[in-house]
Amino acid sequence: MVAASLGRSCGVTTSGEALCWGEDSSGQLGDGSQTSSLVPVPVTGGQQFSSVTLGEYHACGVTTTNAAYCWGVNSEGQLGDGSQTFSASPVLVAGNLLFQSVRAGSFHTCGVTISQLAYCWGYNLDGQLGDGTSAFAVATPVAVAGDHSFAAVAAGYAHSCAMTPQGAAYCWGSSTLLGDGSGQDQPVPVPVAGGLSFSTAGGALSAGQESSCALTPAGAVDCWGHNDLGELGDASTIARATPVPVAGGLTFATINVGLFHACGVTTTAVAFCWGNNSNGQLGAATAQSCVLNGMTAACATSPVRVTGTVQAGASVARAAGRDAHVQERNPSILLQRLGPDVLNPASIVRAPRQ
């Protein structure tokens, strides 16, 4: 599997070795250095990984023995080792917890243990750790509040979501991203409105910066949150406080939410994307335009097929996916930084923080 984030990528080989490549000013590659690399370099420590996940300036992995390790920037405690000191090598997440999955948000991290309990750590000013507090930085895992069992978790920038084994979705954090319709910040899990039942398979839940999406057992996609550039895919640019179905009647196997856009792969192995297309991130030309704060960007408010061919008869199973994690949540901040190159994620650069 592979994962990508700001300026770098990581992957896990079939033999369980984790490798990373790209920008490394604060140890984000996990190879013990702060030297960027144009080719994959092994993550140090000799651990055998089953998965990796990338935040904005940190990364985490779950080993084949269910231990969680993280590396990179740690200014908000997102490595979970009890410190706020960056590490260029993997450090063990505190608490002797055994995880089935971990998802890195922009500056926080959440995981589900093998006993189906959710824990989060790191940045928490919006209540995205779900423990009922809004402390700035939490350097060790805290249990997500409530008597819930979870099968999967997803982490964005200002919110997090999780799925119960029965397919009920819960979110916590910033008010406009929770899908509960309340319009209130929630530092503890609240049920996503509508009484919907979602798939619990890997790749069925994804939280980005502006929105979240989840797959139903039948392969439909429902999304909620901001929608300025069509990132909900419901043929509109109207923000949705509760889930709405992605237009087009497609049957998806996986879903992945990014910055102002989302993509999914259907059960027939065809990729579709929707939302912002100002830099070609949808993989196809679009004639539609969307406006955010007076600035215009190419977009698609409904799914468009990614250009290319597909092997006849191909199919795809639901496999473990990665949540997309991005930088600034405030559109005005984005626009100030980007200027005329509207909403180009590659243009958003923070000074690495140690």
Image (cartoon, rainbow, N blue to C red):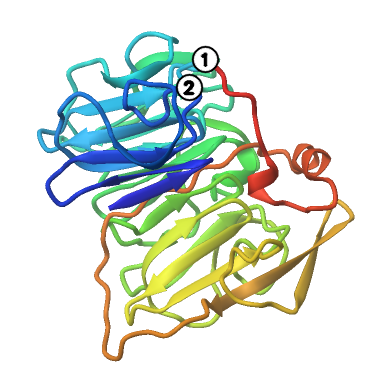
Work out whether residue 103 or residue 311 is closer to the camera in this orientation and state it: 311
Is 221 placed left or right of 230 in the picture? left
Residue 263, placed above or below residue 29: below
Q: What x and y, as percent, mark residue 247?
A: 56, 77
Name the quadrant containing residue 85: top left
Residue closest to the far right: 294
Numbered disc 1: secondary structure: loop
Residue occupying image coordinates x 24% and y 50% = 165
Image mark for residue 354? 1
Earlier sequence position, callout 1 versus callout 2: 2
As shown in the figure, which amino acid type bears the numbered disc 2?
Ser
Name the quadrant containing residue 162: top left
Is 224 placed left or right of 207 in the picture? right
**Visible residue check, residue 134:** yes
Q: Are marks 1 and 2 in contact (CB under 8 Å)?
A: yes
Q: For the image shown, how many numbered marks are present on the structure?
A: 2
Q: What x and y, as percent, mark residue 274?
A: 59, 68
Work out whether residue 18 or residue 233 is closer to the camera in this orientation and state it: 18
Work out whether residue 125 or residue 103 is closer to the camera in this orientation and state it: 103
**Mark 1 or 2, which is nearer the eye?**
2
Image mark for residue 26? 2
